[in-house]
Image (spheres, grey):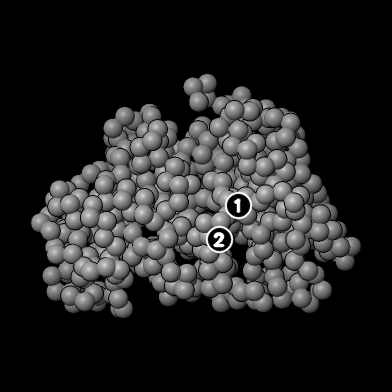
Amino acid sequence: MPARKSGSPLRRPSRGTSALGAALSLGLVLAGCGGSNVAAGTDGADAPSEDCAAFTQYGDLSGTRVTIYTSIVAPEDQPHIDSYRQFEQCTGTQIVYEGSKEFEAQLPVRVQAGAPPDLAYIPQPGLLTTLVSQNPGAVRPAPQAVAANVDQHYSETFKSAGSVDGTLYGAPLGSNVKSYVWYSPQAFAAKGYAVPTTWDEMIALSDRIVAEDGKPWCAGIGSGDATGWPLTDWLEDVVLRESGAEVYDQWVSHAIPFNDPRIEAALDRVGSILKNPDFVNGGLGDVSSIATTTFQDGGQPILDETCYMHRQANFYAANFPEDTDISENGQVFAFELPPIDPAAPQTILVGSEFVVAFSDRPEVQAFQAYLSSPEWANAKALAGGELGQSGWISANAGLDPANLSNPIDRKSAEILLDESNTFRFDGSDLMPAAVGSATFWRAMTDWITGQSTQESLEFIEQSWPASS
């Protein structure tokens, strides 16, 4: 789910960890890699120098390979794979990509069996904390080059989320803005609907759509072993809007119980939309269909106007058909989930994957460093644009928003890079893995299929690890 962008080239160092660290610790930020990729099948030695000059810092990695395990699957996987090609061609290493919908369940199994990948893209800091604590020495601290890139190019919100007990383990990969509602500007214009600016206006619009024989909302929470996670985002956003960032932080850290009355009130507010049979599930069925509809399919009815609103992060753009006009006046776009109290400070919910290593071989550290750089963030943005794919952004301050493929991506990147904004990281991702990527998901699935708010929150509260 994921599931988060100049100087002169360096002389090629000798191969090895010390050479890589020495080169990258200088804190140099290389210029963009330039135009076309090296032709397929061309190795680094034969590649044009103007295309590979920016990669000399990583050394000659010929004959090596780096394995990646991730939850990022089709259709989002191809731009990632494409963004690695120049690194492969210029350094000589091979990047082996494996995406899985069972990532959260299978990664701990691989680590405990002593057969982890070289790198994993971990979308939950809580899972990172669990892996570090339960498998001493298995997760490698971020090398110096990665730490330097994080300090230079990322905010403290993201650095903290990639750290455990003050040690940085992972740099952000892609990042995302979660506080969005997708809609169709064209359909709104035709119906005379205005984008709501407050929660009350959003509910009034929902009531109007019902009065005009429509279904205002659609949703899907199916995601393999991760089924239920979209509802955690709903609850987190409402807690932030209803009770504020301080209460949110207390809830996420378990300074207040999971079933605190304020959290109960927030989930009931979510239920006033998603458990309301008049409001959902446009084009997909009744309330119960939310649990059986995949999150990828959940917002598709917006395109045929069988629903009008769908709450999901910016990355959802990648799930619309390739020819969809995603723009301010297009077939689909997104507005920020409106405030409950317009006078209260507003906080934006964000998320990210983190690049975490289980090996410190030179080629692994080199690829880690590349993935934490502005050069990779821009290469990934361009790769998505070449495929006509939307929905990926980075919180890397070196990302040029102009390289992103459409207005929703650029809008989201500008939100992430605006230092005046207040952010909170996805709460379920920060919680212990036994809660955030287990009982929280399960309880939200049971809740949408009929379990009460009180029972659902009590179940999660009882599952919180005693040592956390």
Percent position of residue 261, x then y: 74, 31
The disc at residue 123 is: none
Residue at the spot x=26%, y=60% of the render? 28
Choose top left, top right, bottom left or bottom right for residue 384.
bottom left
Q: Quadrant of residue 333?
A: bottom right
Is residue 104 at all visible to an observer of this figure?
Answer: no
Disc 1 marks which amino acid? Answer: Ile
Q: Identify the residue position indicated by label 1 in the image.
A: 348
Q: Residue furthest top?
A: 466
Q: Secondary structure at mark 2?
A: helix
Residue that sits furthest to the right in the current view: 211
Q: Is residue 414 visible?
A: yes
* Residue 415, label in figure: 2
- Where is residue 132 drawn, in percent x and y? 37, 33
The correct choice, above or below, for 283 with respect to 172 in the image is: below
**Mark 1 vs 2, N-terminal side:** 1
Q: Which residue: 55% across, 32% down? A: 253
Q: Is residue 52 above or below residue 430?
A: below
* Residue found at x 72% / y 35%: 262
Q: Residue at x 72, y 43 (%)?
A: 242
